[in-house]
Amino acid sequence: MSPFPRADYRGLSLYAPDRRPVGVDLSDNTNLWGTHPAALARIQAATSDDLARYPDLYADRLRAAVSQRFNVQADCVTTGAGSDDVLDSAFRAAYGTGATVRYASPTFSMVEPLARMNGIAAKAVLWSAAALDPQLLLEEDPDLVYVCRPNNPTGELLPVEWVERLLRHRGDEGPLIILDEAYANFAEETMISWAVQNPRLLVARTASKAFGLAGLRCGFGVAQPETTLAIEKSRGPYKVSRLAADAAAAALLDEDGWMANTVAECLVNRARLSDELSTRGLRPLESRANFVLFAAPSGSASDDALALRERGIAVRPFTGIEAIGEGLRVTVGPWPLMEHFLDALDETPWADADEEANASDSPPGRAS
Ligand code: PMP
């Protein structure tokens, strides 16, 4: 057998969620108000040099923007083509015989494949158990611990004190804690200031969500310089294009404008959508992100996602969610889109079943 690819790659499958075009895509938690105008203006002003010449080796202008926005030194910042790239590079820098990442599950679905791609064993701890006792994530001395805050797909925001307990245990000797803050703008909380103080903390952020720049592929991480240097080495040079870096920098430095306004509207709509779902008995989980996870109405997330897709709406199905069993994750956007979604939800087969069964038993996914 050919030595390529290496043996532990053969069992890995390609990350391929259902991305077929659909009328209203509420499946990927991007900013449904569009993109940041300052970023778009920079792209529209592109010059020949932007494309013909190499970008900064290590995205220095983007690092400078992150440094200014978050009041951290530039050498505490690393960047990547999306925060996936920052996570990937951090994992690669941790690779070694028997290297392990521990994480509370359910969480961001790329963690397990990213670990395996990099030859790292991924060990899941049940979310509810880890939420009660963060030390469960430190059992068997992992090299890395991944925590998503707020968590994808549940939207839960673990308390700062919880992270503090994780960091305190084992002092400077413990694993690197990767805090994924992809959705932190919607929780209006960040632990970036902790990352520059603590040698064991890396905060990963993305321009893909609140800033409306998923198509640019731009992310960054904040940690102490020793950690950012390790990640830069592992990721390599020229990974963030000149236009992406400049456009993301323009968006980041426009702190109180477009992004803040769309986040504010998103938070209002998140509460309103959660109320609508509760009214339908669908038990939405309390979310601090720009999405809401709720009980699959029929009890089968894949059936319900399909029924919604047939009505022009994409949502993301999940199974094995502790509080609700099978669930659907829906991105929060402008209210007219939410109305389309709710109308489609009310047209799905289970909605009729519910009317018929009004006085008797509820369908399996619903609260009684
Ligand atoms: N972290 C989390 C929790 C996410 O949900 C996502 C995107 N779905 C990412 C990281 C990666 O984002 P990107 O690579 O677009 O920056």
Image (cartoon, rainbow, N blue to C red):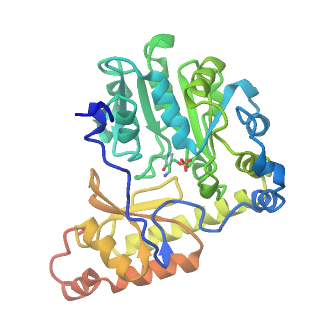
Please state the horizontal and vertical placement of residue 211, each as a whole percent of the image: 67, 55
Image location (x, y in percent) of residue 277: 40, 71
Q: Is residue 305 above or below residue 150?
A: below
Residue 11 x %, y %:
25, 41
Q: Nearer the viewer, residue 168 or 177?
A: 177
Quadrant of the drawing holding the C terminus: bottom left
Q: Quadrant of residue 356?
A: bottom left
Q: Residue furthest front?
A: 2
Residue in the picture at 31% in, 19% down: 98
Q: Is residue 165 visible?
A: no
77 vs 105, left or right, is: right
Quarter of the N terminus within the rendering:
top left
| Image point (59%, 24%), residue name | 233
141 w.r.t. 255: above or below: above
In the foreground, 84 or 210: 84
Report the residue at 35% width, 76% height from top. 280
| Depth check, front residue: 153 or 271 | 153
Residue located 83% across and 49% down the image:
49
Q: Is residue 293 above or below residue 281?
A: above
